Amino acid sequence: MKTEKELKIKFSAPLNDGDTETQTYGCRANNPDICGNAYMDGVCAFVSSDCICKKPSSAWKRQYMKLKGDAK
């Protein structure tokens, strides 16, 4: 299992293999401590065995599309 520090990923960091419009590899929240889904089983990257956040912020979809466009 990855450490919490390894799973904190900057919102503007390049996309990871596990990133989609609806999920992120690791946590991209600016302040994970105030995330409403922090440490929720089956939702939060910090406690999921696959290190995937299943409920990123509402701004993530827009950021994902921006990052995906930058990758081309």
Image (cartoon, rainbow, N blue to C red):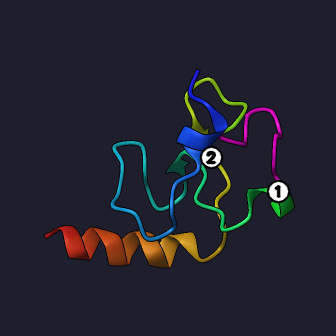
Does residue 67 show up magenta in the picture?
Answer: no
Magenta stretch contains residue 40? yes
Res 15 → quadrant: bottom left
Q: Quadrant of residue 30?
A: bottom right
1 or 2: tag closer to the N-terminus: 1
Q: Position of residue 68 (x, y in %)?
A: 28, 68
Q: Does 28 sit above or below residue 54?
A: below
Q: In this figure, which residue is indicated by the disc labeled 1?
A: 33
- From the viewer's perspective, is the residue at label 1 or at label 2 nearer? 1
Counting from the top left corner in percent of width and height, residue 19 is at 43, 51
Give amino acid for label 1: Asp
Residue interval drawn in magenta: 37-45
Find the distance from the CA under tag 1 to the CA under tag 2: 14 Å
Amino acid type, mark 2: Cys
Quick check: marks 1 and 2 in contact, CB under 8 Å? Answer: no
| Labels in figure, total | 2
Choose between 71 and 1: the one closer to the eye. 1
The residue carrying mark 2 is: 53
Q: Quadrant location of residue 60?
A: bottom right
Majority secondary structure of magenta residues: loop
Q: Is residue 50 above or below residue 6?
A: above
Left or right: 39 as drawn, with respect to 58: right
User: Dot 2 lies on which element?
Assistant: strand
